[in-house]
Image: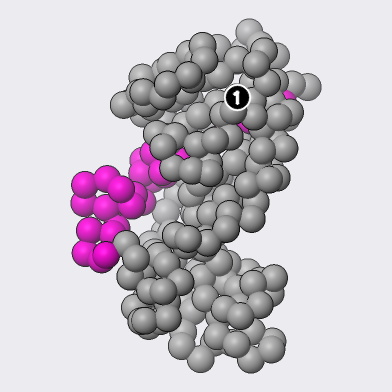
């Protein structure tokens, strides 16, 4: 069974009604980015940061996977599918995908603010001031903030190296270190990019571009992949 590695970004989740950070009208419109997505912001105004992510978690609880998420899950019937996502939602898991690596953390998780290896699955519950880990430290969202190390990038690079087919959905490939994963894909590996606004990336090799939103593009991709099993 061939290994299909898929890198996903906010474009796949926006079709489920989740606002994206960088688009017009996105979640950060009313906040300076560094207020809600940096460790300095956490130190300055912990309550604001908790409120921000509690609201996102509540929104996620009602969100449903769309056709793109479902289509990737269905491809597990024919491929060894490994998903690397820049998204902090759990819509891939809700759709039934069984191998998902979150580069930037996940909204349904909390971790200790002092001992980051202490992590907890909190589902859709809010994190409140005074919620503490087993060692008595305040819990924070299990999200990688600006300036923090993406600890899973090495694992993601290892997965990219093993791809027989590599697919990019809903990401412009301008945010590092995730954007650098394309350079770990074997030279002989076919690459497909699904995006309504095709990214202009120098040296992107001979990728095949599918100019469509994620839900539409996944149907085109499934037709292509039927000949590559």
Q: Does the segment drawn in magenta span residue 14?
A: yes
**Residue 159: image location, x then y, percent:** 70, 36
**Residue 75: image location, x then y, percent:** 63, 28
Q: Which residues are magenta?
A: 3-32
Q: Does the segment drawn in magenta span residue 117?
A: no
- Relative vertical location of residue 163 with respect to residue 123 in this rendering, above or below: above
Look at the image and tell me in which quarter the N terminus lies. top right
Which quarter of the figure has residue 194?
A: top left
State the residue at coordinates (50%, 29%).
Answer: 168
Disc 1 on helix, strand or loop?
Answer: strand
Q: Nearer the viewer, residue 29 or 99?
A: 29
Which quarter of the figure has residue 80?
A: top right
- Relative vertical location of residue 210 with respect to residue 107 in this rendering, above or below: above
Look at the image and tell me in which quarter the C terminus lies. top right
**Residue 135: image location, x then y, percent:** 69, 89
Report if residue 152 is visible in the image.
Answer: yes
- Relative vertical location of residue 150 with respect to residue 160 in this rendering, above or below: below
**Residue 219: image location, x then y, percent:** 47, 21
Q: Which residue is mark 1?
A: 166
State the residue at coordinates (65%, 16%).
Answer: 187
* Structure colour scheme: one colour
Q: Nearer the viewer, residue 31 or 183?
A: 183
Report if residue 55 is visible in the image.
Answer: no
């Amino acid at each position: 069974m061939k290994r299909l590695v898929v890198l996903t970004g906010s474009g796949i989740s926006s079709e489920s009604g989740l606002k994206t950070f960088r688009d017009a009208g996105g979640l950060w419109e009313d906040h300076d980015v560094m207020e809600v997505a940096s460790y300095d912001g956490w130190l300055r105004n912990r309550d604001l940061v908790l409120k921000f992510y509690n609201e996102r978690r509540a929104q996620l609880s009602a969100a449903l996977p769309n056709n793109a998420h479902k289509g990737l899950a269905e491809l597990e019937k024919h491929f060894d599918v490994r998903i690397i996502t820049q998204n902090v939602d759990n819509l891939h898991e809700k759709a039934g995908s069984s191998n998902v690596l979150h580069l930037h953390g996940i909204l349904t998780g909390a971790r200790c603010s002092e001992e980051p290896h202490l992590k907890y699955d909190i589902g859709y519950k809010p994190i409140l001031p005074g919620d503490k880990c087993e060692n008595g430290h305040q819990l924070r969202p299990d999200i990688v903030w600006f300036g923090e190390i993406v600890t899973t990038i090495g694992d993601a690079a290892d997965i990219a190296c093993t791809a027989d087919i590599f697919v990019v959905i809903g990401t412009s490939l301008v945010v590092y270190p995730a954007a650098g994963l394309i350079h770990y894909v074997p030279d002989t590996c076919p690459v497909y990019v699904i995006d309504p606004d095709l990214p202009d990336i120098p040296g992107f090799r001979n990728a095949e571009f599918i100019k469509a939103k994620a839900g539409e593009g996944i149907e085109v991709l499934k037709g292509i992949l039927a000949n590559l099993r």
